[in-house]
Amino acid sequence: MARAFWKGAITFGMVVIPVKMYVATEAESVRFHMLHKKCLTRPKQVLYCQQDDEYFGSKDTVRGYEFARGQYVVLKESDFEKVPTRSAHAINILGFVDTNEIDPIYYYGSHYLEPDEFGAKPFALLREALKKTQRLGLAKVTFQRREHLCCLRPSDDILVLHTIHYRDELQRRPELSPPEQAVTPEELEMAVSLVTAMATNFRPEDYKDEYRLALKALIEAKIRGEEVIVREEPKIEMPDLMAALRASLAAVKVK
């Protein structure tokens, strides 16, 4: 059974909705270990203090903030609980925005929200109100030692909380200079036809991480002692644009 990693309440106006928060996503990748090249043994990672000339473990460390060069203030676990924020135990809704108003570049995380028994009705009311108005609840909440800007979005019978980057966290767009090139009406019409012909619905189950699957297959082949054959990638050529569009459109229609 899934375990909630945060408990608190959604608040907006005078309404309080007790909720639990669950992790919604987890990135998958093939994991490797660092080994000693000579004997393929996993090394022990230790910390070294140059001042005391001694090695020590992670249990003998503390968190320090460097406020001046070489000078630190130490924070204990209990100190983090004393940080005065309104969002420490509440998802504080600041307002409601149109569904399409937030640029996707701001999104970076997703979490599921579930009401407890006493919050079921106001939770359902908020969920249905967001659906009807096609709006998102813009909010702030604190967990994992930082205050997150976020939004609440209705999804089936629950709410999903999406964490959002603050404006100053976005990298400034570099001075990009894509070459200007006018397109003809015929080229645009053909491109629109191709886009329309390739229109589809997003079904997440149809897509897999092909690189991860191929990497695991390579690892299994090496375990069996088989030789791994590398296939050469075909060279990419730049055909005539209109010819490429026509050929692409014809190929789509054949499917």
Image (cartoon, grey):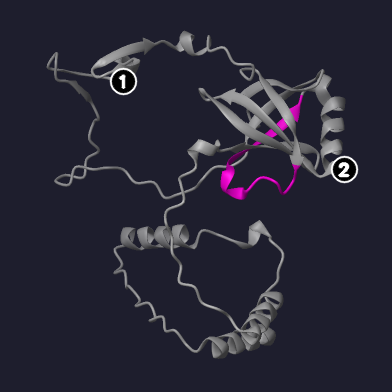
Q: Which residue is more in the foreground, 114 or 220?
A: 114
Secondary structure under badge 1?
A: helix
Write the residue at 35% across / 11% down: 74
Q: Position of residue 156 (x, y in %)?
A: 79, 43
* Residue 70 location, quadrant: top left
User: Label 1 crowding class (10 Å Cα cut-off): few <14, some 14-19, many 20+?
Assistant: few
User: Label 2 crowding class (10 Å Cα cut-off): few <14, some 14-19, many 20+?
Assistant: few
Whichever of labels 1 and 2 marks the residue nearer the N terminus, that label is 1
Q: Is residue 4 visible?
A: no
Which residue is situated farthest in the left direction here? Answer: 53
Residue 42 is left or right of residue 100, and the answer is: left
Q: Amino acid at mark 2?
A: Lys
Q: Looking at the image, is 63 positioned above or below residue 178?
A: above
Q: Are marks 1 and 2 in contact (CB under 8 Å)?
A: no
Q: Looking at the image, is 48 positioned above or below residue 224?
A: above
Residue 22 is left or right of residue 122, and the answer is: left
* Residue 4 location, quadrant: top right
Q: Position of residue 91 (x, y in %)?
A: 68, 25
Write the residue at 34% across / 46% down: 32
Secondary structure under badge 2?
A: helix
Query: In this rendering, which labeled residue sits more in front, label 1 or label 2?
Result: 2
Write the residue at 38% across / 59% down: 220
Q: Position of residue 169 (x, y in %)?
A: 49, 38
Which numbered tag is attached to residue 58? Answer: 1
Residue 209 part of the magenta segment? no
Say which residue label 2 marks.
Answer: 132
Residue 63 is left or right of residue 137, and the answer is: left
Q: Which residues are magenta?
A: 98-115
Q: Is residue 23 visible?
A: yes
Write the residue at 83% across / 32% down: 126
Q: Which residue is more in the foreground, 46 or 140?
A: 140
